[in-house]
Image: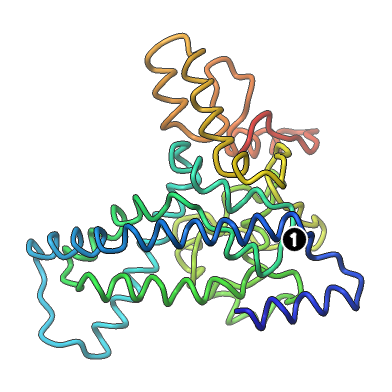
Amino acid sequence: MALLIIGELIYSHYHKRSLYTKGDTFINLACTTWNFLNDLLFRGVTLLILAWIQQFAFISFASKDWVYWVLLFLAQDLAYYFLHYTDHYVRFFWASHVTHHSSEQFNFTVAIRSSVFQPFYRFIFYAPLALFGFEAFDIVFMYALCQVYGFWVHTKLVGKLHPVFEFFFVTPSHHRVHHASNPKYLDRNMGMVLIIWDRIFGTFTPEDDQEPVVYGLTKHQEENNLMKVVFAEWVQIVKDVRHAPDLKSSFMYVFGPPGWSHDGSRQTSRELKAALEKPGATQVQAHDTQ
């Protein structure tokens, strides 16, 4: 990973591409350090929870042959898809995940701009794997292995690949779309390794050469303040709940989709897309972070 980052930095410097900024790179490194410490602190708890759940598994594998590992890979990648989908469509989880999307750059260090609080709830989405008989350590190991794959797709320097590869696997082209703030691209391409989940569940959008990707959030966020990068959305949630007119609105401000508002002053990604589909519509932006 370090070699890829160094190589991209050198390429960026000699080809005047401006792929990196000092402030953004510092935030990326700070986030991955914070995430690593949280993950390290909670990893034992995660393993204990998954091991406890496995006691109630309704499937038992006779051996850890190649079938076991292939099934675990598929199950883990699918579980990650649902985790990632939830991160985007439930504001409580988006408040954690938004850190990863707030960079207006797109380079290999953005891959390690991790959601610092995700280690505390990730196990929820992997609990079903334990019920299917996969061992706790194996689940965590497969997750880590797939995260390694997810690193290389965070780059502008790799164009579209062979159509067959693009059909089955997440590529830099697919993931550029995922990090876009263009309304057309919002909340698309959720997969980590396999893009087939997005094709199956209707969240796939290809990169359009006629619409260049604009990276970051739909509302600009101060990039070089670590505390604001990590806590800005949490602070906004508290403000929204305090000013909510009723209990239902309070609930929606926490667990509804990002961009939801009781008075229609802001728009969710789905509302933005719907607006674009109307005759004569022009490019619009959200009134809140998404």
Q: Tell me which amino acid carries mark 1.
A: Asp
In the displayed orientation, state which residue is furthest to the top.
Answer: 245
Taking 247 as reference, is 35 left or right? right
Looking at the rendering, in which quadrant would you find the C terminus? Answer: top right
Q: Which percent across, then down, holds residue 1?
A: 60, 79
Closest to the observer: 209 or 50? 50
Q: Which percent across, then down, holds residue 204?
A: 56, 59
Q: Which percent across, then down, holds residue 43?
A: 31, 63
Residue at position x 60%, y 39% from top? 269
Residue at position x 7%, y 61% from top? 56
Residue at position x 50%, y 76% from top? 148
Position above or below: 158 against 201: below
Position above or below: 160 against 79: below
Closest to the observer: 121 or 247? 121
Q: Which percent across, then down, holds residue 264?
A: 60, 19
Q: Quadrant of residue 255?
A: top left
Position above or below: 276 against 105: above
Q: Which residue is mark 1?
A: 208
Residue at position x 37%, y 14% from top? 247
